[in-house]
Image: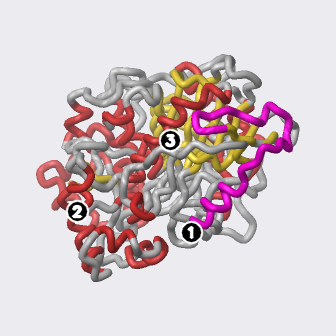
Amino acid sequence: MKYLHLLLCCLTFGCNFPSETIVDTDKGKIEGSYNTDKTVRIFKGIPFASPPVGNLRWKAPQPVLSWNGTLQCTEFGPSPIQNTPEPFYCWTEEFIALPEPLNEDCLYLNVWTTAKTKTEKQPVFVWIYGGGLSSGSANCAIYDGEELAKKGVVFVSFNYRVGILGFMAHPELTAESGKNASGNYGLMDQIAALKWVKNNIAAFGGDPNNVTIAGQSAGAFSVNTLIASPLSDELFHKAILQSGGLLGSTRTQSLADAEATGIRFMEKVKATTINELRNLPAKDVHLISNDTNVGRFGITTEGYVVPKDIKDHFKNGRQHQIPIISGWVTGDGNFSGDNEMTVEAYYNEAQEEYGAKASDFLTIFPAETKEDVKKVKSKLGMLHFAGVPSHLLATYNTQPTYLYQFGHVPPDKQGFPNYGAFHTSDVPYTLHTLHTWKRNWQPNDKMIEDALSSYWVNFAKTGNPNNDGLPTWKSYDEQTGNIMVIKDKGPNSEEGFLGNELKFLTDQ
């Protein structure tokens, strides 16, 4: 609430910037700023829902109250409550949310635009961050929207609730919802942000009838969910999933399982009602939820926001049928599963899992040494994490779907381990934000950055990533299996790439 008070105190009738930086939204006027060369108007910290605090904790986001005067929107709003953000493993500071402020009052969004008038109707590109649905923020350096805006889209990013505050279900919450559902508040935040876009983006020169949603990792899980959700109808028209998806995965939970986790948490804090939990400080709720014995908080297939059977929903064509880009990074499988097992253990595992088909599996995924096992387990992790979900997404989509694999290895950072093409390393290339990432960039990096960001912008404009001067990216189908493979020399469309592997894994 402290930040809400400060935000309201910033209301002013004054004007410190040229008039183009003042925009009328449906709740009141806001004032942003220009980038350095005054080619991009930037608006940060625009409230798109009421603060989800007090009695609004664990409820669907509620509309923002209108304000008088002009709201200054030149700084990011607070990130959602999470562990203190800090670099770890391969993710340096550029990939991590700012450590402060963190606040339960976090539902703010940001806009970058080069449009000078309301009538330009530029395509809209909406970015959804990753972080395992337990961390993350729109303020990460690599999510800056300036360069993509310069390429001709209105770039939007936003915060959503994460962890227990964004995804806890409980029988009492289910009963009070009126929808026989609970959890997925973070997903409802995303839908609320998209409704704000629909109602307001024209004022920034954007086209509300040409919206592309995009996200990476948990952001890609979110995009996959939004494609399925009946609540997101007519809010977007194209989608991009980078390293993640729900089809063929085990990253959802039933309402009963999610409610059981909520019950365990309530028992952990010795509370008897949801109102008691709502009276606890948000930081305390988060810290206690870190106990691994409580359970995980994530996407719940409760039948309201998310269909109860995701695969059946897609298999029967009940999702939004739209053009899609979906893909993965070769390092997506490096941090999942046991990559250090012996050859014997690998063969035994194959026999246990595939039985009579174990020999077929080992023909497609052979390993003769422990190093081979490490490589093939990483490959399997990559395919299960994002390859299979991308393949199935394309299979069930009646609109063109474009698949890719990113295997380009960024330059070394002095004194830092080389993690190869690691999970998230494609994002600064696709969003054209290498300048925010401190590495010794080479000409081929800049070439790949320009190519991939151009594909993304072309797709946002037309639903087709192709344009003159770029290698042709063919859409995917099971017969030809065209996948755009991005290596150190740049992108190249390959027919039948990983065809045997994907067919085996999806036929099981």
| 308 or 452, nearer to the observer | 308
Give the class, few, some or many, for how many residues have Cα within 10 Å of label 1's Cα (few <14, many ≥20): few
Which residue is at the far left? 356
Looking at the rendering, the stretch of residues picked out in magenta corresponds to 1-28
Which residue is at the far front? 68
Residue at image position (20%, 56%) is 175
Q: Mark 2 belongs to which amino acid?
A: Glu
Q: Quadrant of residue 230?
A: top left
Residue at image position (58%, 61%) is 419
Q: Colour scheme used in the picture?
A: secondary structure
Query: Which residue is label 3 attached to?
Result: 193
Marks 2, 1: nearer the viewer: 2
Please state if 171 lies on the left or on the right of 449 as rendered. Answer: left
For the question of whether residue 379 can be seen, the reply is yes
* Sooner in the amino-acid sequence: mark 2 or mark 1: 1
Kind of element beneath mark 2: helix
Where is residue 56? Give x, y as percent. Answer: 41, 58
State whether residue 113 is above or below residue 291: above
Residue at image position (30%, 46%) is 364
Give the class, few, some or many, for how many residues have Cα within 10 Å of label 3's Cα (few <14, many ≥20): many
For the C terminus, give its image quadrant: top left
Kind of element beneath mark 3: helix
Query: Which residue is label 2 attached to?
Result: 172
Q: Are marks 3 and 1 in contact (CB under 8 Å)?
A: no
Q: Mark 1 belongs to which amino acid?
A: Tyr
Q: How many marks?
A: 3
* Sooner in the amino-acid sequence: mark 3 or mark 1: 1
| 15 or 350, nearer to the observer | 15
Query: Which residue is label 1 attached to?
Result: 89
Residue at image position (53%, 30%) is 199
Where is residue 111? Give x, y as percent. Answer: 66, 39
Q: Mark 3 belongs to which amino acid?
A: Ala
